[in-house]
Amino acid sequence: MNNSEVLFSEILKARIAELEYGEITVENIRRIYIEETGQEPPGEITLFHSDTYKSTNYGYDSGFDGTVIHFMDLGAGINQSYTITRGSEKGEDEGSGPPSDWLYNLFGIFGGKAQSQYRDAVNFDDKVNKEIDKLVSRRLSEYNQAGIEVNNIDLVKRGIGHSLGGNLIQTLQLTEELYEDVLAINDAPPSTYQLATIDGEFRNAIFIEFNIQGRRIDDIYQIDPNKLTAFAEEYYHQRGQAIHHLTIQEDFLYSTIGFRGFMDVGTRDVINTYPHTDGIARYMNKVSDENLYIIQQFVAKHAPAYEKAGITGLNRSMFGIDQDFFTIIHDIKQDWVKIFEPPKWKQGSVPMVFGVIGFGSFTVDMPFAYPVKEFPSEFFSNQKEFITRALEIKAKLEELTAVLPSLLALVGEISSDLMKMIQVHVEEMLGSIKRMIEAIGSAALDLGKNLVKDSFSNNMLQHENILTILELSVTMEQESRNIQKSYQAIIDDTKGFVGEFGDAAHAHGMEHVVNSLNQVEGRRYEGTDMIRYKNATDGRTIEVNLSSAVRIYQQGLDKCMEKEEALTSWRRLYYTEYVDDLDFRKQRVMNAIHQMEANPRNYSHLLPLSSSDVKITKINVHEFIRPLDPMFQDSFEGMYHYLREEIEKSKAMIGRVRNSIEELFEEDQNISKLFELR
C-alpha cells in the first residue's frame, strides 16, 4: 500500500471526528474503521492529545482542544497524520469550567482581536510534528538493525474540524499551509478581521489595497465589509483550494457567511436534510450591518483584556468588577473593626531635674504610659480606591446599556417571535444595571463629600462611609443576582424555540452530519455507535446497537477469560498446597526411613541406654501413611467442574448473542470481523 489517504471517505472522517467530543481512543478508531470498511486500519496508530501539550503562552486555559491521529507503516509506505480540532463546548472541564470556546467565537472570530486558541493550535502542531519525527526515526532504526531496507517517507498531514474547530483548521491552513487538505464540517467561517490580526502580510496588503495611511488595525473595521471580504477571498484563494466544506444547509453557522467580514473560501458540499425548510438564512439575511458593527466594536474593544488575562481580565474590562474590587470592600470592613479596638498603651519617659540642698541638682527620667490610637495604614487609600473602582464600574455599565439595545434590535431583525420571548428579560436586566449605576453614583458622591470634610478625625463620618460602602455592596450583589435570573430566564424561555431555528441547532451537531452522510440502507448512528435495523416478516422493525453488542460480546469474553485464569490458578494452588505437598511430605518420610534402615548404628543415641553397652545392628520400620481423604478431593473436583461448566455456559450464551446478530444480518460479512476486533 502506498501513502494514499487512510481515512478516504467523509463518513470515516466525520465519525472519527465525532469521537473528539467523547472518548477518542485507538480501539474506537479501529472499531469505526472496521464498521465502515470491513478491514483493519493500516499500520500502527498513535494518538497525541492537546491536554498533554498545554501551551505556556497564556496564563489561562484558552479552551483549545484537539487530537492528532498518526498512522504509520513505513514498510507499506504509510506516514500520515490527521489533526482534529474540536468545536465549541458549553464549558471547559466537561462543562463545569468557563465557556472559553464561546468567548473565543465572540472575541477571536467575530471581533477579530483574540488569537489564543489559534496560537495554542500552532504550538500543538509544532510539538506533535517533532514527536512524530522521533517516532519515525526510531522505527527506521529498528528496520535497519533488522537488516530490512526501508526508505524514509515524508509525513502527509491532513486536517478535520467541526464548528469552532472548523474555523481553527481553516485558519491554520490559510496562514500556515500546514495540510495537504482540510475538511471543515459545519464550520464557523473565518473572518477577515481575525485573519488581519493573525497574518501580518495580509494586514499589510489591506493597508496598501485600501490606502490606510495610519496602518492601525482598528481602521480596518471602517472599510466597507463587502469590499474587504471580496479582497480577502481573492487574497487567500490559492490556499483555500485545499479546504473542502461539508455543510448541512440548515446549520445556523452556514447562515452567518453573509455577516460582515465572514469569508467563504474553498469548495463546498451542501446537504439539505430538512426538505420542509430552506434553512434560517432568510432570517439571518435581515440583520443590519449597523447593529453588527456596534456590537463588533464593543467586542473588539474588550478582546485585548480577554486575550491578556482570560475571563478575569474580561470581567474587569467589560464590567469593571473583579476579585480585587471585593477584596477592597473586605479590607475596608476589617479596617473599620480595628478603629473601634481599644488604643494601645506605650511607655515613655520625661527627664526631670531635682535639686537637694547641700547636694546640688540631678536629672531623672520619669517613666509614664500613654494611649496611642493607630489607624490602619491603608484605611483611607482603600476608600479612595473603592470610589475610583465604583466609578469605573459605573462607566462600564453605562457603556453596556448603550450596546444592549443594538443586541435586542439584532434579535428582532432575525425573528420577532424570538425578540418577544427575551424582550421582557432584557428590559429587566437593563433595569438592574440602571439601578446599579444610580447606586454607585450616589454612593461615590457621598463618600467624596465625607473625604473632603476630613473624616480622619470624625468617627461619625467614618461610620457613614462604611455604611455607604456596605449598602452599595448589598445593592450590587442583589442586582447581580437579578441579572443572573434574567439571563437564566432567557435561556429557559428560548429552549422551546422550535421550528426552523430548532432544526438549525440540531443540524449543527456531528450526529446529524454523520447520519446525513450515511448511504447504507438499514444503518444509522447514535452518537459514535452504529445502529443496524431490519424489517421482520411480521412488519416490525428490529434494531440492534451493533457497536454496543460488540462491546458486550468482547467484555463478556474478557470476563470469562479472567474467570478461567482465576479457576486455573485456584486448581494449580490446590495441587501445590495439598496433593503435591502430601506427595512431597510422604517422600521426605520415606527417605528418612530408608536412611535409618540403611544406617542403624547412626541412631544409637536415640536409645535410653548407654551406647557403650548396646549396639544397634538393624532397624525395621513398619510405615503406614494415610492418603488424602477422598471426600476432600471429590468436593474440590466437584466445585471445580461446576465453576468450569458455569463459565462455558456464559461463553455459550455470549456466543448465541453473536450468532443471532450474524444470522439477522447475514448479508453483511463485516459483522463477523467486528466481533473479532481486538
Image: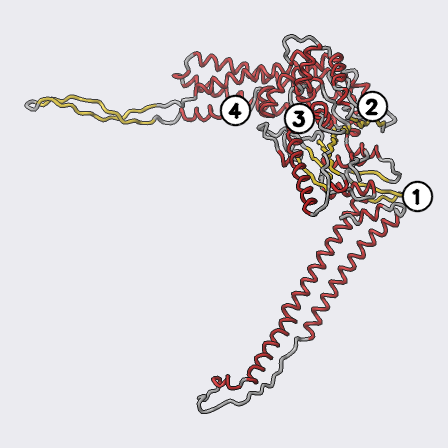
Near mark 4 (Cα within 10 A), the count class, few <14, some 14-19 or many ≥20, is: few
Mark 4–mark 1 distance (CA, rounded to whole Å): 68 Å
Q: Nearer the viewer, residue 546 or 586?
A: 586
Marking on residue 21: none
Image coordinates of residue 332 in percent, x first then y, are: 46, 23
- Residue at label 2? 279
Query: Which mark sits nearer the N-terminus, 1 or 3?
Result: 3
Q: Is residue 611 above or below residue 484?
A: below
Marking on residue 324: 4
Mark 3–mark 4 distance (CA, rounded to whole Å): 30 Å
Near mark 1 (Cα within 10 A), the count class, few <14, some 14-19 or many ≥20, is: few
Mark 3–mark 2 distance (CA, rounded to whole Å): 30 Å
Q: Answer whether residue 615 is visible to the viewer in this image.
A: yes
Image coordinates of residue 132 in percent, x first then y, are: 67, 37
Query: Which mark sits nearer the N-terminus, 3 or 4?
Result: 3
Mark 1–mark 2 distance (CA, rounded to whole Å): 35 Å
Q: Nearer the viewer, residue 458 or 160?
A: 160
Mark 1–mark 3 distance (CA, rounded to whole Å): 53 Å
Residue kind at label 3, given as amino acid type: Tyr
**Of the two numbered discs 1 and 2 in the rendering, the one whose residue sits closer to the viewer:** 2
Is the C-beta separation of discs 1 and 2 under 8 Å?
Answer: no
Q: Answer whether residue 419 is visible to the viewer in this image.
A: no
Mark 4–mark 2 distance (CA, rounded to whole Å): 47 Å
- Residue at label 3? 118
Quadrant of the image for the N terminus? top right
